[in-house]
Every structure is written in C-alpha cells, then in structure tokens.
Image (cartoon, rainbow, N blue to C red):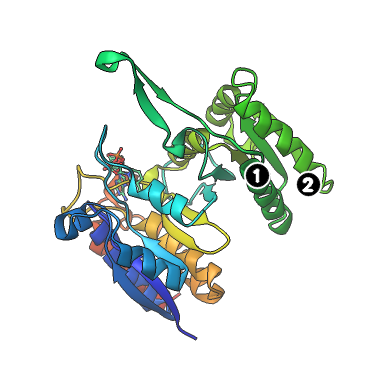
C-alpha cells in the first residue's frame, strides 16, 4: 500500500540531498507518494511566509514528513521554522542514533548510542525579552514541565526496553538549575521506577560531555532536555564522522518528521558535493515508521556498503565522490546487493 508523505526539500543543500534521497528510495522500491510543500527561505521568497498554512495542512493530513534543512537567520525577528514545526505538531521526542560506520573515518570504534532529546520545552520555548532601556539585559526563560519530562523519559525507557538497549542515562544540570532541571531529574527517577527491567542512571551534562569525548562506548541511551540534547547530539555526530552521517526523527502522538541533524550547509550549497547520507538514513527510519521495513533495510545496507567502499565516500568523509556519484553507488548496490 502506498503511503502519503509530505516532502519539504529545504534550503541550501536541501534540494540536492532531497533529490538523492528520492532517487535512492525509488531504487529500493519504497511505496511512498510525496506531497511536495515549501517552508523556510524558499517559502519566504515565494509566499513571504516561512511556514505557509498549506504546508501545515499537508502534514496534518499525511502525519509523516521528510524534511530537508531549513535556514533560520540569526538574531531577532525570525523564529525558527524547525522549532515552530516541532511545537505545532507537539513532536516531543527528537531521536538521534549515533553509530560508528565502517569506512567512515572517526576517533572511535564500537560507538552505538542514541540521544533522545526533549523537543518542545526548555530554553527553546521561545519566551525571550529585553529588560530595561537600551537593551540593557535580555532574558530567555527555560520552561520544564512535569508532563513534558514524564513523557520524554517514558519514551526513552520504552524505546530501551523495545530495542533491548543496555541502559538509559538521564542527563541534566540539576546541581545548578535546581528548579527546572531538578524537576526533570525527579520526574525521571519516578518514571524509571516503573521500568525495573531497564537499567537507569543520571549524569550532569558537563561530566557527560567529558565522558562522551573520552569513551563514548560507555553510554547507551541518553535522555535529556532540549538545549543539552541539541548540543550533545552534534557532539555525538562528531564522534562518528560528522554531521553528514547523522539522521534524526521528530516524533509525536499525531505526526512524525524525519530529517538530517545537520543544517543547510550554505558553504557548499549548489556545488553538488553534499553528503546525502544523513537524510537518506532519516528516510530509512521513515520507511520503518510507515511499516516498510524491508525497504528501510535495503536502503541502510546499500548506504553502509557504499560508505565502506573506497572511492564512494563524499569529501566531508575524506573521500572524493560528489553527491551524484555516491547516490549512483548506493542505487547500484540496491539493484545488486
Ligand atoms: P550546518 O549543519 O549547515 O553546517 C555545519 C558544517 O557542516 C558546514 O561546514 C557544512 O558544510 C557541513 N555539513 C553539514 N551538512 C553536510 C552534508 N550533508 N555534507 C557535507 N557537509 C555538511 O550548520 P550551520 O552552518 O550552523 O547552519 C546553517 C543553517 O542551517 C542555519 O540557518 C541554521 O539555522 C540551519 N539549521 C537547520 C537545521 C534543520 O533544518 N534541522 C539544523 C541545524 C541548522
């Protein structure tokens, strides 16, 4: 059965890696029908609205989206479309698996961890203002709720149980942020008591960052607040070869958006050299999500094989291939596994 999926190609390298992803999905026989929509800079240019109502309506209808990166100018006056999408659809779980991949140069071997980031609260709640005359000070308010903490920690524990992971580590800064992070930690410990079969502990974010850099194989599933999850997941991507290979999923009760962890990479946009791996692996997770597990498996195997082969890796991974060469190599491996 064909599944309808909203497609947002995105800004910068978005259109290039989206084209590569669609080609690979087609080669793997994905039964997906794409409803193409726009957001971000492309939508500002065409419709003067970074998140047009028809894009929202499409995701409300399909409940599944594949999204390229969207540009958000720094500073005032422009709210992140990514944050707006996550909040609108209440996509509270941002899930970013991090694995060492054969052939991809990285500092460590044997890394296999998952960062589960709370995606709707914390300092990203969008409550910011200036204080006093002449912008004397600025305040950004971190909101952490019992409800938000409860459901993200529960999600991580259920995931760990389902996927037979070894341990869930709740990462926080409760020693300093006693109220907001203290609540997150207290609620997390309460929820963990309902999962006696899943090992659970906690770590302070700075110590966890050091542990990740010293020996990332010591961690398994990390569940953390929005800001720490944002930072730690990029750090983790760096441990296994960089942003080019890091996929992500934004999951809620009523919708799911799959995307790469990286941004629009303006420095290489339009040059045809972007690595599409992260978006392709995100699309494979989308296929799992809509029940097309065999397609997901075909895509992953072909990507892993191509990455392991000299001459087929893109430049961010120390190779010489461009986007088209890598994409063709993955498609060839799907046709001849
Ligand atoms: P970035 O992830 O776009 O780029 C960081 C570095 O990684 C750059 O050197 C880039 O060339 C490289 N890189 C990233 N993806 C790559 C790929 N697939 N292949 C090869 N190299 C790759 O981060 P940035 O420069 O801080 O952000 C640029 C824009 O992207 C900003 O407007 C930011 O807001 C936006 N952004 C969007 C998302 C999203 O849509 N989910 C995520 C992060 C950043």
- Residue 34 visible at all: yes
For residue 212, which quarter of the picture?
top right
Residue found at x 44% / y 54% = 88
Q: Secondary structure at mark 1?
A: helix
Q: Which residue is mark 2?
A: 198
Q: Which residue is mark 1?
A: 147
**Depth check, front residue: 149 or 66:** 149
C-alpha gap between disc 1 and disc 2: 21 Å
Q: Residues within 10 Å of mark 2 (few under 14, many from 20)?
A: some
- Mark 1 Cβ inside 8 Å of ligand 1: no
Foreground label between 1 and 2 = 1
Image vertical order of residue 262 relative to residue 204, above or below: below
**Depth check, front residue: 31 or 41:** 41
First along the sequence among labels 1 and 2: 1
- Residue 333 visible at all: no
Q: Position of residue 222 (x, y in %)?
A: 61, 40
């Amino acid at each position: 059965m064909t599944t309808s999926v909203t497609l947002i190609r995105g800004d910068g390298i978005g259109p290039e890696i989206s084209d590569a992803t669609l080609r690979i999905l087609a080669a793997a026989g994905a039964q997906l029908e794409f409803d193409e929509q726009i957001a971000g800079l492309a939508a500002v240019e065409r419709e003067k609205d970074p998140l047009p109502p028809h894009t929202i309506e499409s995701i409300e209808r399909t409940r599944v989206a594949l999204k390229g990166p969207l540009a958000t100018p720094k500073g005032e006056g422009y709210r992140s479309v990514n944050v707006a999408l996550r909040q609108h659809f209440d996509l509270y779980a941002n899930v970013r698996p991090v694995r060492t991949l054969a052939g991809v140069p990285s500092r460590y071997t044997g890394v296999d961890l998952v960062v589960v980031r709370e995606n709707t609260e914390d300092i990203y709640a969008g409550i910011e203002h200036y204080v006093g005359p002449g912008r004397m000070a600025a305040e950004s308010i971190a909101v952490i709720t019992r409800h938000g903490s409860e459901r993200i920690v529960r999600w991580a524990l259920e995931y760990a149980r389902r996927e037979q992971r070894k341990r869930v580590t709740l990462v926080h800064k409760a020693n300093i942020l006693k109220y907001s992070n203290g609540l997150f930690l207290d609620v997390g410990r309460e929820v963990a008591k309902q999962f006696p079969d899943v090992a659970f502990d906690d770590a302070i974010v700075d110590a966890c960052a050091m542990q990740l850099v010293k020996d990332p194989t010591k961690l398994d599933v990390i569940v953390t607040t929005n800001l720490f999850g944002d930072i730690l997941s990029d750090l983790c991507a760096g441990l296994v070869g960089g942003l080019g290979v890091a996929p992500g999923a934004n999951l809620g009760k009523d919708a799911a958006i799959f995307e790469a962890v990286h941004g629009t990479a303006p420095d290489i946009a339009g040059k045809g050299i972007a690595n599409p791996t992260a978006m392709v692996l995100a699309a494979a997770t989308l296929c799992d999500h809509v029940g097309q597990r065999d397609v997901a498996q075909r895509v992953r195997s072909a990507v892993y094989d191509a990455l392991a082969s000299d001459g087929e890796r893109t430049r961010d991974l120390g190779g010489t291939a461009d986007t088209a060469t890598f994409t063709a190599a993955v498609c060839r491996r799907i046709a001849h596994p």
